[in-house]
Image (cartoon, helix red, strand yellow):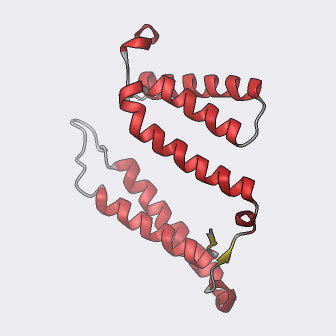
Amino acid sequence: MIKLSELHLGFLTALGGMILLFASANFGALPGQDYGAGTMPRLIGWCAILLGCFMVATSLKNLPEMLRPHLADWVRKPRLAIAALGCIAVIACYILFAETVGFIPMSFISLLALMLLLRTSLVTAVLASLATTLVVYYGFSRLLMVPLPRTEFLSFLG
């Protein structure tokens, strides 16, 4: 994996912020409110642009070596490279199967797989995955009213 310098990452962060601003430009306001669905994406977009500009500005003092990307040290360790690929595979599985399986089981399985892949003990991984899944589920579905993928299998959770 190529290790990018702060200059490269700053540019990519600012570019991502601009893309986020562009993507959320047509989000309308909520009825009766001064803010709407685009408020948070725009705020995050502006923060990303400012952060990216700051990163680019601070990296300009070391310009010659900042322009040369190089391989990260962890890529040379097979276990860490396999773990990185495993993380990408777990995220892809979540994206593909969350609608079918539901948020709670898929989130629990994904978190458990990631923790075991990164060599967390089984008991800690199970407890942390369960706690995180339930906190995220209730935080998003009940407090923020965000619809999460559901199945009839776990309908008793509300």
Residue at 24% across / 44% down in the picture? 29
Q: Nearer the viewer, residue 62 or 57?
A: 62
- Is residue 145 among the parts visible in the rendering? no
Residue 104 lies, in percent from the top left, at 49, 23
Q: Nearer the viewer, residue 103 or 27?
A: 103
Residue 53 lies, in percent from the top left, at 52, 75
Q: Is residue 92 left or right of residue 26?
A: right
Counting every numbered tag in the picture gives 0
- Is residue 21 among the parts visible in the rendering? yes
User: Quadrant of the image for the N terminus?
Assistant: bottom right
Residue located farthest toward the bottom when viewing the structure as drawn = 64
Q: Is residue 130 left or right of residue 101?
A: right
Residue at 68% across / 24% down in the picture? 126
* Quarter-of-image position of residue 158: top left
As drawn, 71 above or below 106: below
As drawn, 57 above or below 42: below
Residue 124 lies, in percent from the top left, at 75, 27
* Quarter-of-image position of residue 23: bottom left
Residue 17 lies, in percent from the top left, at 43, 64
Q: Is residue 96 left or right of residue 56?
A: left
* Quarter-of-image position of residue 109: top right
Residue at 56% across / 71% down in the picture? 9
Q: Nearer the viewer, residue 29 or 98?
A: 98
